[in-house]
Amino acid sequence: MAVKVIKEKCVGCGACIKVCPFDAIKMVDKKAVITDKCTACGQCVQKCPVKAIEKEEGKKGGVNVDEYRGVWVFAEQRGGELLNVAIELLGEGRKIADELDTELTAVLLGHNIDDDAETCIKYGADRVLYADSELLDVYTTDGYAKVIYDLIQERKPEILLIGATNIGRDLGPRLSARVHTGLTADCTRLDVDKENRRLMMTRPAFGGNLMATILCPNHRPQMSTVRPGVMEKAKPVEGRKGIIEKFAPKLTADDIKAKVVETVKSDKPVVALEEAPIIVSGGRGLGNAEGFKLIEELAKKLGGVVGASRATVDSQWIDQPHQVGQTGKTVRPGLYIACGISGAIQHLAGMQDSKCIIAINKDPNAPIFEVADYGIVGDLYEVIPAFIEALDNVDDIMEAIKAVK
Amino acid sequence: MKIIVCLKQVPDTNEVKIDPVKGTLIREGVPSIINPDDRNALEEALKIKDKCKDTVVTVVSMGPPQADVALKEALAIGADEAILLSDRAFAGSDTWATSTAIAGAIKNIGDYDIIFCGRQAIDGDTAQVGPQIAEHLGIPQITYVEELEILDGKVRAKRALEDGYFVVESEMPVLLTAIKELNEPRYPSIKGIYKAYRENKVTVWTANDYEVDRDNLGLDGSPTEVNKSFTPPGKASEVEMLNGDAKEAARQLVVRLKERKII
C-alpha cells in the first residue's frame, strides 16, 4: 500500500504539501514527490484538486477473515473487582456486536470471581469465557497472554477490545505480536463498516490537529485498546441471560517467567478526575509549580478537582494522576476550566466532551478557545482571583443584573 | 553484562505550535530529541554500567539517516555502541512491523541480558513496541518499571499500576520498559559530545544487513493502515469571548454560569 502521484495529472499547485501532516511531500520540477516519511494517511489524496494522487492497495499477508466471528472484551479485574473500563467496553462491545449481528463475549481471567462473570452478563455479554486458576489471581503477562492466545486460536474472534490501563497496555501488544495482528492504541471512537465487517478505530494522531481512522483489514482479531472514561457504561439489566463457560486453563507455574512476588496498593488518595463534576486544570501558562496553589483555590471554591496538562506534569509541577489528555485521563465533567492551557490535540482529546468549557489564556489564538464555550483572553493571575471574588459576590452580581433588567 | 537500549528520535512536542489558520502543526524549527522515557531507559542501563564496569551498553534506533544525531547523543551520554536501522524498506511501519525490524536486529546482535525501552514515545503514545519486541524474541517483559534491582542472574522490578505497584521478578534475558519515575537521566559531558562526534561510532544497518523477512516490514508488512485522517469536527456552537478587564470578564462569566445553572 502506498500513495502515488500521477505525474501527468499533477499541476504542481502544492495543496498536498500544505495539508500533509508528516511533511512527506516535496516539489521537484513542479511535480509533487512523496518521500519516505509518508504514512499513507491519505490526507493529500482527499485534498488534491485534480485527483493526481492515488492510494494503491498493496499485497498483504493475513488470514481468511471470514473464519473469524464474534466480539470479545477483556474483562479486567483487580483483586476480584471488575474495573469500570471493562464495563464501559462491554457497553461499547454490545453496540458493535449488535451491528455485526454476532455474539458479545467477555473474557474473564482470575480465581474465585464467579460474581464478576454474572456482572459481565448483566452489562451486556452473551457469553463469558471464565478461566479460573490460582495462577491467574494476579495479572502476569505470561499467564494472561497464554490463556487468551489459546482462546483466540480455538475460537477465532473478529474483534478484541482491551482497556488501556497499565495492565491492558502490557497485555495488548504482547498478544498482538503473538497472534500477528494489528493493535490500535487508545481509541476514542469505534465504528463498524458493516459490509466488510471492519472495525474503524479512530484515535488522535500526532502530526497536527488530526484524528486518524485506523483499519486492520487482513488480520484478525482486530484489536483495540480504549482508555478508561472514553466509552459510556451500559445500564445493567437484572436477570439478563447469558452463558458462563467456566474452565481450568492449561497453565502451569513454569509458564510464568516474570513472576509477581508482591502486590502493593497505594495509600495515596486517588485523584478521582473521571468522576469529578467540576475540573479546574492548569497548564504551562502557570509559569511554575506554585501556580497550582491558585488552581487549587479555585477548584476548592467550586467543589471541583485539580487537573493538569502534560507539560506541567512533565515539568514535575504536579503529579501524573492529575494529568488530563491522551496520555492522562479522559474526562467529561459538567464544567471544565482550562487555565493557561494552549490546547494541544493530546489535551483536547481528553476533555473536549465536557459539557461546559471555560478557557483562560493570554494567547487569543490558542486552540483551546476552539472547543471552549466561554473564553477570556488575559493573564490568569488576574482573571482567576477576579473570578474567585466574583464567585464570593455571586448573589450581589445577580441582584445587580436583575435590577438593570 | 550486555545491555541493549532501544530509543527513538521524536519531535519535541513541547515546542510544537499549531498554525492558527490551517490548524496543522508548524514543524519548522521543531527540535528533535531522544524520546523522554527512552532517556530513562538509557540512564538505568548506564547506572548498571557504573556499578559493574564490564557492562556493554548498545543503543539501537530505527529511523531516517538523520536519527543518528539521537544515537550520537546517547554515545555522548555514555553508551558504548550504537546501531541505526535505516532503510526505505522500514518506511511507514506500524508498531508490529517496527518491532519486527528491531527484534530482528537484536537477534543479529545476539548476546544480551537486558533490553531496555522507554514505556512509550511522545509522538505516538502507543506503548506497544517494547512488549512486541519481547514477544518476537520470546523473552519475558516487565513494563512501567519505576524501580529496579539486579540480583544474581535475575531482575526485581517495581512495576507501576494506577493504584499501587507489583514487585515482579524475572530471569534474564528480560525486556524492561522505563517510566520517568525510574531515575533522573544524566546529561552528556562536553568531553563526551566531543568524543562521540570525533569517533562517529554509529553503525547503520539496512534490511539487507541482517536476517529479517522483508514481507513483514514497512507499510506492506503492517497489519494496520490509516484509512483516513481528518480534522476533528469543531464544536457546534461558537465560543463566546468575554471581554473587558479581568474583573468585568469574571463578572460576566459568573453570570453565564449562574444562568446555565452550572454553579
Image (cartoon, rainbow, N blue to C red):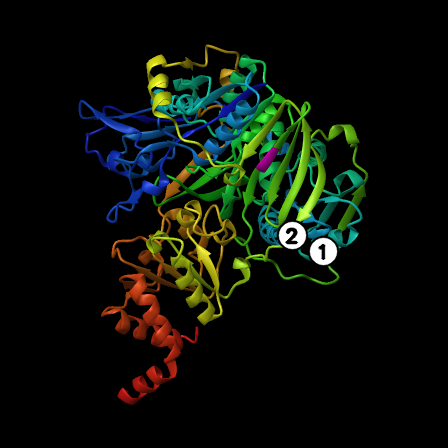
Q: Residue at x 80, y 48 (%)?
A: A112
**Residue A238, quarter of the rendered image:** bottom right
Mark 2 secondary-structure assignment: loop
Q: Residue at x 59, y 14 (%)?
A: B111
Q: Mark 1 lies on which chain?
A: A
- B256 magenta-colored: no
Q: Earlier in the sequence, mark 2 or mark 1?
A: 2
**Residue segment shown in magenta:** B142-148
Specify whether disc 2 shares its chain with disc 1. yes
Where is residue B155? Give x, y as percent.
Answer: 65, 29
Q: Which mark is residue A119?
A: 1
Q: Are discs 2 and 1 less than 8 Å apart at CB?
A: no
Q: Which sits in the foreground, B172 or A194?
A: B172
- Disc 2 crowd, CA 10 A, few/some/many (<14, 14-19, 20+): some
- Disc 1 crowd, CA 10 A, few/some/many (<14, 14-19, 20+): some
Q: Is residue A267 rendered to the left or right of residue A324?
A: right
Q: Which chain carries label 2?
A: A
Type of the residue with mark 1: Thr
Where is residue A252? Give x, y as percent.
Answer: 79, 31
Residue B204 vs A11, above or below: the answer is: above
Residue B240 vs A351, above or below: the answer is: below
Q: In which quarter of the image is the C terminus of chain B?
A: bottom left
Q: Is residue A38 rendered to the left or right of residue A365?
A: right
What whole-number distance in Å separates the C-alpha atoms at marks 2 and 1? 11 Å
The answer to whether one can see residue A346 in this image is: yes
Nearer mark to the viewer, of 2 and 1: 2
Secondary structure mostly taken by the magenta-highlighted segment of the chain: strand
Query: What residue sits right under mark 2 in the picture?
Result: A83
Type of the residue with mark 2: Leu
Residue B175 vs A241, above or below: the answer is: above
Where is residue B193? Give x, y as percent.
Answer: 35, 22
Where is residue A73? Give x, y as percent.
Answer: 64, 45
